[in-house]
Image (spheres, grey):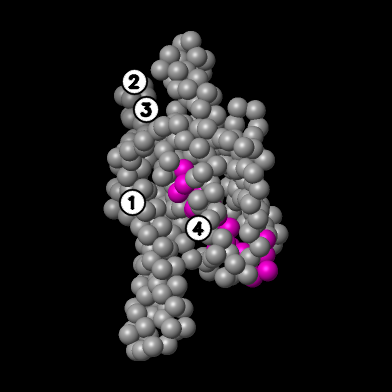
Amino acid sequence: AIIFFMLLSGSYFISSIVIPVGEIGKTARKIAHGNFNTRLEKKNDDEIGNLCEAINYMAEELGNTEKMKNEFISSVSHELRTPLTAIKGWSETILDAGDDQETIQKGMRVIISETDRLSLMVEELLDFSRMQSGRLKLIIEKIDLLAELEEAVLMYTEKARREQLDLQYEEQIEAAVVMADKNRLRQVFINIIDNAIKYSDAGGQIRILAASEGDFYVVSVSDTGCGISPEDLPKIKQKFYKANLTRRGSGIGLAVADELVTAFGGTLNVQSTLGQGTTVIIRIPTARRYEIWQQSLQTPEKGGEEQNH
């Protein structure tokens, strides 16, 4: 009887633990080699079954990330090729233009515009790489938020006019001193305004508003563009994600902007209705609020709940 019980227990152990663990090991190795479509069958509602479920979820997420990464590489390749083609084409046209000043001026405007576009894209890629490796250095100092916002608006005023967009800018505050990296904050504004123009059609309107809200300064950028679907909206700040594949862009600009704003102790939120437009709301703490937040990070036991930014 004892031998029979031991044989029965051993058989149960092999069938319920050893074999499933072996299958899990094989599947994990397939996933490690890039086969993200492989799945485990959940046979029982126990620890082994929960482990199978977790590995299936991991494989699905890895597959989605791999797909977005491949789409990102394809998108960036296309985004680099398009302005380079325009620059090369207009350079050749200018060389053959002789004394035709109208053609020369038009060509130079295109070349400058496309060069700016390339510079913005390269800066986004470099920042993204630095963020992923922890090498992004921020120079945090007291700066005027309005000065950086005004410069970003000025950069896109002419472009908006050329694309027949009504760009409106309103300040409801006279000064906005914040603690941030001057160049990075301007880059955030540039990225958001660029997106608003990118996803708007001729005749549309873009409204930029700067205001205060308690211990925060709030910048909102609203457009009457194509909008974002409810399914895509929760994903738009994910790295590599592009809700609209027909529009130019690398798919990392908003993710970079979100991480930068978070580093300044602020938040970046997006509200959108498909077919009606999008509003991006950036909240940056006042310099005083930022200093209090930094003190709480250094002494969490006195400053309350510790935040990770």
Q: Residue at x 45, y 15 (%)?
A: 300
Labels 2, 4: front one: 4
Q: Earlier in the sequence, mark 1 or mark 3?
A: 3
The answer to which quarter of the image holds residue 180 is top left
Q: Please rate how many residues cluster around mark 2, counting C-alpha atoms within 10 Å: few if below 14, some from 14 to 19, many from 20.
A: few
SS of the residue at dot 3?
Answer: helix
Q: Are marks 2 and 3 in contact (CB under 8 Å)?
A: no
Q: Earlier in the sequence, mark 3 or mark 4?
A: 3
Q: Residue at x 42, y 63 (%)?
A: 117
SS of the residue at dot 4?
Answer: helix
Amino acid at the residue labelled 2: Ile
**Image: magenta residue range:** 185-205
Q: Are marks 1 and 3 in contact (CB under 8 Å)?
A: no
Q: Residue at x 39, y 53 (%)?
A: 124
Horizontally, is 236 left or right of 63 in the view? right
Query: Can residue 257 be seen in this snapshot?
Result: no
Q: Percent from the top left, x then y, of residue 2?
A: 34, 20
Q: Percent from the top left, x then y, of residue 164?
A: 63, 70
Q: Which residue is mark 4?
A: 155
Q: Which residue is mark 1?
A: 126
Q: Which residue is mark 3?
A: 9
Q: Percent from the top left, x then y, of residue 76?
A: 39, 63
Horizontally, is 146 left or right of 127 in the view? right
Q: CA distance from mark 2 to mark 3?
A: 10 Å
SS of the residue at dot 2?
Answer: helix
Amino acid at the residue labelled 4: Met
Q: Earlier in the sequence, mark 2 or mark 3?
A: 2
Query: Which residue is more in the foreground, 51 or 188?
Result: 188
